[in-house]
Image: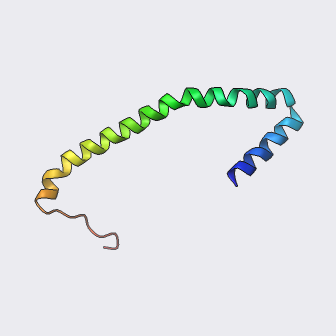
Amino acid sequence: MNSLLTLLLWLVLFVLCWPLALLALVLWPVVWLISLPLRLIGITLEAVFALLKAVLFLPARLLGWRPAPAGA
């Protein structure tokens, strides 16, 4: 559904302003390539914070602490 909506929006842009639509079509892969390193940095930072959380909560887990149930 998301791809269909994107295609329809691009077709509307193509009808209204075809040079801008063609420019967007050509530049989209470049923007995607530039965003790849930023995504990798985000994944790495998420993993580092998960590790820190696990290390910080390890003593509580060893002592038997359990989170409260969601319904309580």
Where residue 40 sits: x, y (%)? Answer: 45, 33
Where residue 65 sits: x, y (%)? Answer: 16, 62
Q: Tell me what residue is drawn at x 75 percent, y 51 percent.
A: 4
In the drawing, does residue 56 fall left or right of residue 49? left
Q: Tell me what residue is drawn at x 30 percent, y 73 percent.
A: 72
In the depicted structure, whether residue 24 falls above or below residue 64:
above
Where residue 31 sits: x, y (%)? Answer: 62, 28
Split into 4 quadrants, where in the image is the N terminus? bottom right
Which image quadrant for residue 47?
A: top left
In the depicted structure, whether residue 26 falls above or below residue 45:
above
In the drawing, does residue 41 fall left or right of residue 72? right
In the drawing, does residue 52 fall left or right of residue 33? left
Residue lying at the far left in this picture: please name it: 63
Residue lying at the far right in this picture: please name it: 15
Q: Tell me what residue is drawn at x 56 percent, y 26 percent.
A: 34
Q: Tell me what residue is drawn at x 71 percent, y 48 percent.
A: 3
